[in-house]
Image (cartoon, grey):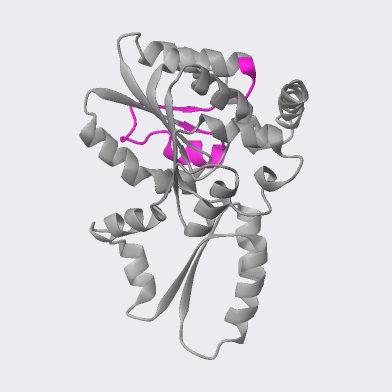
Amino acid sequence: MFFLYNLLVTFAGFCIKILAVFNPKMEQFVEGRKLVFETLATRISAKDKTIWFHAASLGEYEQGLPVIEKMKINYPDHKIVLTFFSPSGFEVRKNNTIADVTVYLPLDTKKDAIKFIELVHPEMVFFIKYEYWPNYLQELKKQSISTYLISGIFRKDQLFFKWYGGFYRSALDSFEHFFVQNSNSKDLLFQLGKANATVSGDTRFDRVAAILEKDNHLDFVTEFKNNQLTIVVGSSWPKDEKILVDYINSMTHQVKFIIAPHNIKKSRLKNCKSRL
């Protein structure tokens, strides 16, 4: 099964390179990974102590940020290495100031996993919410590196809980502890024989609470609101916007809206505005 998985990952990497010729986001995905190992070799020395955090995209980064900030305080002598899988996360937060090194996560091939972990040599690893990469997790377990899942969430329809999901279930053996969002996730893990789980809630709430303590004033938003009730829709998708546009067009109350799509493209913004 592992052989088949590695074959599929290699094939996917080949396909992504072809798609990159036609798709700007896929181009970022490919180009951004070309200098990962060179960056790590330059920014991390053999003497450095490191802690590695992995976020799939921007939302997971926001969830992990409260934990990263606490780890910076508790482990001031360690370098924080932050990885992203998606361009939508990396391109927005590649210049963050919380991590010492921010790079894309190379594809989950055995060769790249071994090389990445060798260069980073982390003392602790935190995966945020999800993304379970078998080769990385297997190598972390092999080297006895403490690995944790934070803000994890599990659902019955995930591959782990299918009769044919044994290969994927084995990836969970690499985690020393699971910090999950709800009791249902803890119960599902217990069904798999994983008693090393704690319900710690969703760290997004910690992030929002921290943001509220800061000055988030924006002049153009204040001007737009003009003391009127305003609804903000963040990271919306086309299906969300379809419902939202119908709702806005049928409204009789004086309410203003700020819509921030997940993917901001001129054509999409123009289409949305034309229907209002």
For the N terminus, give its image quadrant.
Answer: top right
The residue that appears at 50% across and 41% down in the rendered structure is: 89
The residue that appears at 53% across and 58% down in the rendered structure is: 184
The verdict on residue 95 being magenta is yes
Residue 118, how many percent across, how many down?
47, 12
Q: Which residue range is magenta in the image? A: 83-110
**Left or right: 206 in relation to 104:** left
Q: Quadrant of residue 50?
A: top left
Residue 166, how many percent across, how many down?
70, 36
The residue that appears at 58% across and 80% down in the rendered structure is: 248
Let me know if residue 134 appears in the view: yes
The residue that appears at 36% across and 36% down in the rendered structure is: 96
* Residue closest to the eye, 265 or 16: 16
Residue 111, how many percent across, how many down?
61, 13
Residue 163, how many percent across, how many down?
75, 44
* Residue closest to the eye, 195 or 129: 195
Q: Quadrant of residue 239?
A: bottom right
**Left or right: 158 in relation to 219:** right
The residue most toward the bottom is 252
For the C terminus, give its image quadrant.
Answer: bottom right
Q: Is residue 157 above or below residue 46?
A: below
